């Protein structure tokens, strides 16, 4: 690849002076942006610059191409607009299937501009979005399906720790409520009191079982089309 050249430095004296002069020339060299970009694509060396000067419109405009690549970033500055001002990227398709979302479910917004997402979450539609039909396709994606195994493992540990702390707080609260009830009602003969104590006991038992059967499917992302 081409790069800016150094001009040779005349050296005199012993080897230490020679090293000093060579080192100073390297330190004074600065690779600017234009030089860096020129080194990435050697247009001058293969005559591209002369060709574009002779044919300024021969830059790919009007051509539609498909690129198969595993590392394309559609948000990159160079992929936004073509030389004649049109969108450069027309569509991005995830061929791995990991990012596919089923948006076949159709819903309509209520009087307050809200819809029920596919995950069950109530979503507020952005007022700047123009949708004459009033119909919205909704879907959702589990975040863990988009992450690597290492990231998923770390997130699950962090979420499990927070969940355990919160669940333990609820267990302590349920135990206290049950103890307070038993202390207040020594003999439970009334039907309503029996049902009330049974509810407290069931709450305590469920919280205990939850701590043993924790299953983290991860957060979900709602998609609106």
Image (cartoon, rainbow, N blue to C red):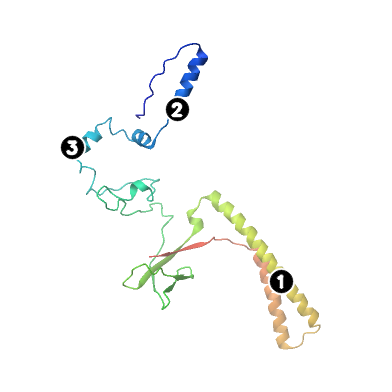
Q: Is residue 203 above or below residue 191?
A: above
Kindly report the distance in space between the C-alpha atoms of the residues bearing marks 1 and 2. Answer: 70 Å
- Considering every residue shown, the one lying at the far bottom of the view is 190
Closer to the camera in the image, 65 or 20 = 20
The N terminus: image quadrant: top left
Q: From what the image shows, is residue 194 above or below residue 173?
A: below
Number of numbered discs present? 3
Label number found at residue 28:
2
Point 32% across, 35% down: residue: 41
Using the numbered discs, state the Cα–Cα distance from disc 2 to disc 3 in whole angstroms.
Answer: 37 Å
Q: Given this view, does label 1 or label 2 mark the residue nearer the observer?
A: 2
- Would residue 208 appear left or right of 133 to someone viewing this image? right
First in sequence, mark 3 or 1: give its number. 3
Tell me which label, 2 or 3, sits earlier in the chain. Answer: 2
Residue 194 appears in which quarter of the rendering?
bottom right
Residue designated by label 3: 54
**Residue 173 has which mark?**
1
């Amino acid at each position: 690849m081409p790069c800016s050249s150094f001009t040779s430095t005349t050296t005199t004296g012993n080897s230490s002076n020679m090293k000093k002069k060579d080192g100073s020339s390297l330190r004074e060299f600065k690779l600017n942006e234009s030089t860096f970009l020129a080194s990435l694509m050697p247009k001058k060396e293969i005559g591209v610059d002369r060709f574009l000067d002779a044919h300024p419109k021969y830059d790919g405009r009007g051509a539609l191409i498909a690129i198969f690549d595993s590392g394309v970033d559609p948000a990159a500055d160079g992929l936004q607009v073509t030389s004649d001002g049109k969108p450069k990227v027309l569509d991005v398709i995830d061929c791995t299937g990991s990012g596919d979302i089923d948006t076949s479910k159709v819903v309509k917004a209520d009087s307050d501009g809200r819809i029920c997402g596919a995950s069950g979450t109530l979503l507020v539609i952005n007022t700047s979005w123009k949708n004459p039909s009033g119909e919205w396709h909704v879907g959702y994606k589990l975040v863990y399906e988009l992450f690597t195994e290492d990231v998923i493992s770390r997130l699950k540990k962090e979420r499990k720790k927070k969940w355990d702390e919160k669940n333990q707080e609820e267990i302590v609260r349920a135990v206290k409520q049950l103890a307070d009830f038993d202390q207040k009602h020594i003999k439970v003969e009334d039907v309503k009191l029996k049902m009330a104590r049974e509810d407290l006991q069931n709450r305590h038992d469920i919280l205990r079982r939850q701590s043993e059967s924790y299953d983290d499917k991860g957060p979900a992302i709602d998609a609106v089309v």
